[in-house]
Amino acid sequence: MNKHLNIFKTYAKGNRSYQLENDLTRALAICLQEDALFFHEVLKAIINDSALYNKLFEDIDGDTEIQIEIQKKTSHIIDFEKVFAVSLSESVMSNFWQQTHNSEYDPVCDLVITVNDILIVVEAKRDNINCTAQLYNQILNTLKKQGKCIVSDKDAVTPVDLNWMKLMAIAVKVASFEKTTGNTNRFLTDFIQLVKGHNFRWLPETPIGSLKGKNPKSIHRRIESALTEFCKNDETVEKLTYNDRLGTTFSKGWANELLFKVDPDFGDLVIDIYPGNTKGQGYGIFHKEATFNDELHVDNIAYPTRINYHIKLMGQSYITGLWLTKADFKKNLYTKANFTKYTGRVKKAAWPAIENLLDEHISSEWKVKCNWQGKILNSNRSLFNIAFGYHVSIRIPFDKLAQLDINHNDITPLANLVESVYKEFESKLMKEKVSV
C-alpha cells in the first residue's frame, strides 16, 4: 500500500500548501465523526469542565444533539448559550480578550461543532501563524448575529488554545489504545499519517539521544519520522505503509524494497534488502553473475554487509522458503546457468528435478526446514514459482543513532542518515564480476 491510498491524501503531484489547511480541517472533522473515542477525548480537552461535560452526557436516555461542520458562515450559526473559541495552530494563542480586530462581516469558520446549546468554533492553521485575532473576529460576528455583544456577553465565551501538538498527543494515545484493544480505526491512523507527513514535530516523540534506555518502540517512531522526511524530500522514493514492515521503495530492478527495523535487544538500526526475491528481480543479478560488496560506507563509516540466501517458493502467495548461510551449501547453487534453467514457474512434473538440485547443492536438512513434504509434495498444487534470492543487511549501532538524533524539532540528521543509507545501497551494494 502506498501513500496515495491514505484516505485523506489526494492524488496530486503539485504542492497543495494552500489546500493543505482545508485538507487537515476536513480530515479532523471526519475523524471526530468516525471515531467516537477520539471525539470524546478532544471534546473533554476543549470543554475542560467536568460538571459541564457530565451535564451533557450523564443521562443515557438524554437527547444530546451533536453536529460537526466545516466552512460554515457565522450567519448560519444559531441557538447557543455558550461558545468555546478554539485556536488550532502551531503558534501559541495570544490573549484573546486583548484583540481589537472588530470588523463586521460574515466570516467563514473552519470547523464548527455544536453539542446541544454549546458552540465550538475552531480556527485551524497549517503552520506557525497566530490565528487569535481571526478567531476573535469570528466570535464577535457570531455573537452579533445572535443580537449579543462580545464585551457584555464575555462570560459566555471561553478561549481555548488547543494547538496541533496537544491535539496529536490525544490522537496518538487514542490510536494506541485502539490498537491495543484490537479496534484500530483507519480514519484516525490515516489522519495521524497525514499530519506526520506534513510536520512530524506535531507528534509526541522523544529523540533517540534523550531516551532512557534503548526503547525499540520510541526508536522505531523516530526512524519512521526520518523516513517520512526523506521521502518528502525525494519524490522518486515512497515510504511503505504496510503494518508489518517499515521501509521505502527501491529504484533498482533487482529489489523493490529497502527495509528498516530496530533490534529489540540492542536498539541498533538494521537495514535489510532482498535482491532477487522474484524471477524478474533475478535477471538484474544473474545476467552477469553480480556479487555484493563486503561493506557499505554511511557518513564515512564502513559497515560490513551480512550476506545470506533466501530460496523462496510462491503460489498465489508465499508458500515456504529456505533461509541459508554460505555454510549450508556443498557447492555454489547461485549461478547464471542454474538461475536460467530452474527458477520461475515449476510444474509438478519438474518437482523431482528441483529436489535433486537442492539435494546436490545444500548440505543442511533443507526438506525439514521448508516442510517440503507437507507444503509441496502433499499439497494440491500443480505448480509453484521458485526464486534464488539474497538477504543482505547492515547494522548501525544505537550509539550512532543517539549521537545524531538529539533534538525533537530537528529530524534532519536522522533523515540524512536514511538518505545516505539509501544511496549507498542503490549505488554501491552490487558489484559485477569482470568478464574474462
Image: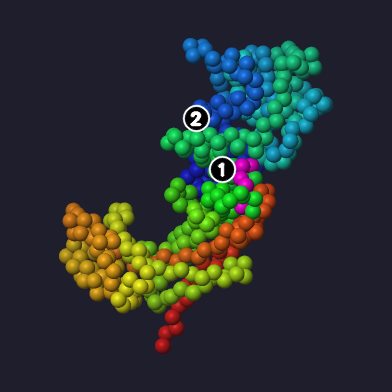
Q: Secondary structure at mark 2?
A: helix
Residue that appears at 72% across and 19% down: 157
How many discs appear?
2
The answer to whether any part of residue 39 appears in the image is yes
Q: Which residues are magenta?
A: 202-208
User: Majority secondary structure of the magenta segment?
Assistant: loop
The answer to whether residue 275 is above or below residue 229 is below
Looking at the picture, how far across and down is residue 142, in whole percent? Answer: 70, 20
Looking at the picture, how far across and down is residue 126, in whole percent? Answer: 66, 40
Residue 340 located left or right of residue 203 = left
The answer to whether residue 207 is above or below residue 336 is above
Outermost bottom residue: 436
Between the C-alphas of marks 2 and 1, the distance is 16 Å
User: Label for residue 34?
Assistant: 2
Residue that appears at 19% across and 54% down: 379
161 inside magenta stretch: no
User: Label for residue 169?
Assistant: none
Looking at the picture, how far across and down is residue 295, in whole percent? Answer: 52, 72
Residue that appears at 43% across and 49% down: 244
Three-letter code, disc 2: Glu
Looking at the picture, how far across and down is residue 276, in whole percent? Answer: 39, 66
Q: Quadrant of residue 398?
A: bottom right
Three-letter code, disc 1: Leu
